[in-house]
Amino acid sequence: PSVLTPTSFPWWYHKKDLLLKIAKREGTPLHVYDRKTIQDLSTMVKSTLKSVDRFHYAMKANNNPTILKLIRSQGIGFDTVSIGEIYNLFQNIDDIKANEILFTPNFVSRNDLEKAFQLGVNVTLDNKYMLEHWGSSLKNQKVWLRIDTDNPQGHHEFVQTAGKDSKFGIPIPEFKESLKLAREAGLKIVGLHAHVGSGVDKEKTWAKTLQTLSDLAELNPDIRTIDLGGGLKVKEDPIEGKEFDLRLVEKALHDTKKKMNPNIKVVMEPGRIFVASSGIMIGRVNQLKSKLDHHYVGIDVSMSHFLRPALYKATHQIVNLSKLESNHNSKSIVVGNVCETGDILNKSAMLPENTEEGDYLLMAATGAYGKSMSSRYNLLQRAKEIFI
Ligand code: LLP
């Protein structure tokens, strides 16, 4: 197919027959995940980013228990953002220990913060308010502080989590005062954290964060850990512009780390890169329609099942799995069946001219922020999840 380049042939390209069989057997819409790819991605991330001492998987990307277990079996911990996520881990992973879990909430309730302390997970505070007002809940705790490094990054404004327009983090000018408030509240700051955005394609971003946080760490000898957040970019469409090279991320980190206090451990908590390309969605063509010069292909995957295109205008490659060997040269608008004009999955998909009702279309790289952001809007059925 013309939209695929040889270097972009992913796992699913070689498993066409199996995927078609599964789609017919299970029905659509459907998520399919490839176990080996999940394992390979963890191995690849760990072996490339050697300067990172420990990884925690941001489970908001995908909380399927099988995925959680596969990732943990690679020696990776978890990053959580709600009490629900923490309970989910204790429920699904028998021998999980509290010290494998980071808790990085924002605008959390005092009640949930206290629960997290009781459970013994590693808490990051992202607001001075808590230091000022919740002293008795915080006394004798060891926590990390989330810093706003004022360097917003990411694939869309909704996922940029630094700078004056973002609700996250303690601005650098408030750092010294926060240390003082922490001392007064009787708690120890033992780590610093920053997550500047998601789908970040500038390879030096994490080294820059490391530099900023290690400069701040010099103001407090108790700081033993620096957490650089997540945000590593994944290509969701092979014809997307810029390549993202993890090796350049490592090079920049390595150069920065060697000038740093050697007693400080570097931690990262990516979500997307561990799972995005391990998953695909399959939808069945319901109807076709040409309206003026627009050619619509309507399938049974919608914004209820996969929100990223509607919410962020994200472009995920779509191919016709039933006619994978045909020339994909007809520009099509692939839409779902939800009653919203924004229910567009790909507004410039290239599909075979003879795409027809009953064909199965495959949407690539849906393993991250797919199922976890889905809803039952319009009371559509949720998509099943299958592992191969
Ligand atoms: N750490 C913190 C504190 C975060 O807020 C996030 C993501 C991560 C780690 C993991 O980021 P990742 O490596 O997955 O980029 N729904 C959006 C992404 C929102 C991410 C929110 N926070 C999307 O589908 O693009």
Image: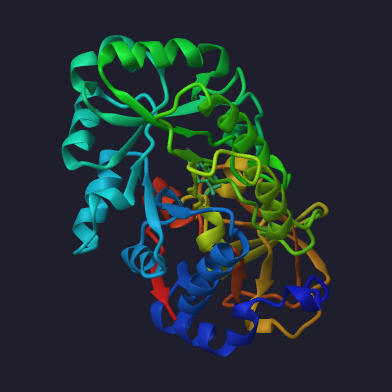
Quadrant of the image for the C terminus?
Answer: bottom left
| Foreground residue among 350 and 278 | 278
Could you tell me which residue is drawn at 36 percent across and 70 percent down? 73
Residue 238: x and y, percent?
A: 75, 64
Residue 376: x and y, percent?
A: 37, 50
Residue 223 picture quarter? top left
Residue 283 seen in this snapshot: no
Residue 152 seen in this snapshot: yes
Q: Is residue 12 left or right of residue 110?
A: right
Could you tell me which residue is drawn at 42 percent across and 48 percent down? 60
Q: Is residue 129 left or right of residue 61?
A: left
| Foreground residue among 138 and 305 | 138
Residue 187: x and y, percent?
A: 28, 22
Residue 30 picture quarter? bottom left
Q: Is residue 347 left or right of residue 53?
A: right
Could you tell me which residue is drawn at 36 percent across and 50 percent down? 379
| Foreground residue among 261 and 234 | 261
Quadrant of the image for the N terminus?
Answer: bottom right
